[in-house]
Amino acid sequence: MVGLVGGSTARAEHVVANAGGETEYVRRLHRHAPAEHQCTSTLVKHIKAPVHLVWELVRSFDQPQRYKPFVRNCVVRGDQLEVGSVRDVNVKTGLPATTSTERLEQLDDDLHILGVKFVGGDHRLQNYSSIITVHPESIDGRPGTLVIESFVVDVPDGNTKDETCYFVEAVIKCNLKSLAEVSEQLAVEPPTSPIDQ
């Protein structure tokens, strides 16, 4: 299930009543200061897979195509994967974009925080910045993961805040759905072992 926690548009300003810890995580870790010409929103996804499996996928700044269905491929500039690293992403057809240049703004393996900012490319998402956090939780008595993703972005000329948020939320929902599918598949696969020779 993907749900909205909050946002700057009228339809997204509520906080999920039973969110519990979600609201606290958003307050502490998902700080965006949108300007008048920007929109922001926060989405959540509960995944039936342990946090370490989900985080391994989320933190792969150099391989977003592992779970993001709209990414064709990605090349990271330079040898190191660290805050400040830049990646060039090629987008699959179906979106109003072909490329995106993105900078790693936050990477915290202890708190499970990844922050990315779009710094160029052929798309309309100017000044797009997102934060995704991953938190352990119990789902049906088993290890699960709460994923929270928030963003802020300029509203393009000719569009409303609602239209812009709706579009970005739709892409994020697809990404989170795919993240859940890939993570949950990894959780049920038996571990591989080296072949005895």
Image (cartoon, rainbow, N blue to C red):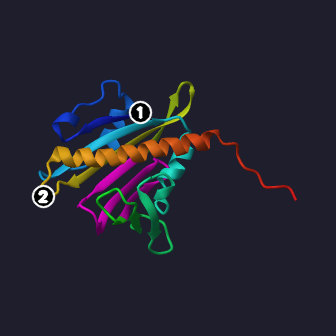
Q: Answer yes or no: do the residues labelled 1 and 2 have beta carbons within 8 Å?
A: no
Find disc 2 in the rendering and name its residue. Answer: 157
Does dot 2 land on a helix, a strand or a loop?
loop
Q: Is residue 67 left or right of residue 10?
A: right
Does dot 1 land on a helix, a strand or a loop?
loop
Q: Is residue 31 visible?
A: no
Name above or below for residue 143 compared with residue 129.
Answer: above
Q: Is residue 147 left or right of residue 128?
A: right
Residue at 54% in and 45% down: 182
- Marks 1 and 2 sit apart, C-alpha to C-alpha, by 32 Å
- How many residues crowd mark 2 within 10 Å: few (<14), some (14–19), many (20+)? few
Residue 23 vs residue 64, the one in the foreground: 64
Q: Which mark is residue 1?
A: 1
Chain-order first, disc 1 or disc 2: 1
Name above or below for residue 147 compared with residue 104.
Answer: above
Please provide percent x and percent y for residue 170.
32, 45
Residue at 43% in and 56% down: 107
Residue 6 vs residue 168, the one in the foreground: 168
Residue 116 magenta: yes
- Quarter of the figure with residue 140: top right
- The part of the chain drawn in magenta is 103-132
Q: Residue furthest bottom?
A: 78
Q: Main secondary structure of the magenta part?
A: strand
Residue at 16% in and 36% down: 10
Q: How many marks?
A: 2
Q: Given the image, on which type of amino acid does mark 1 rest?
A: Met
- Quarter of the figure with residue 148: top left
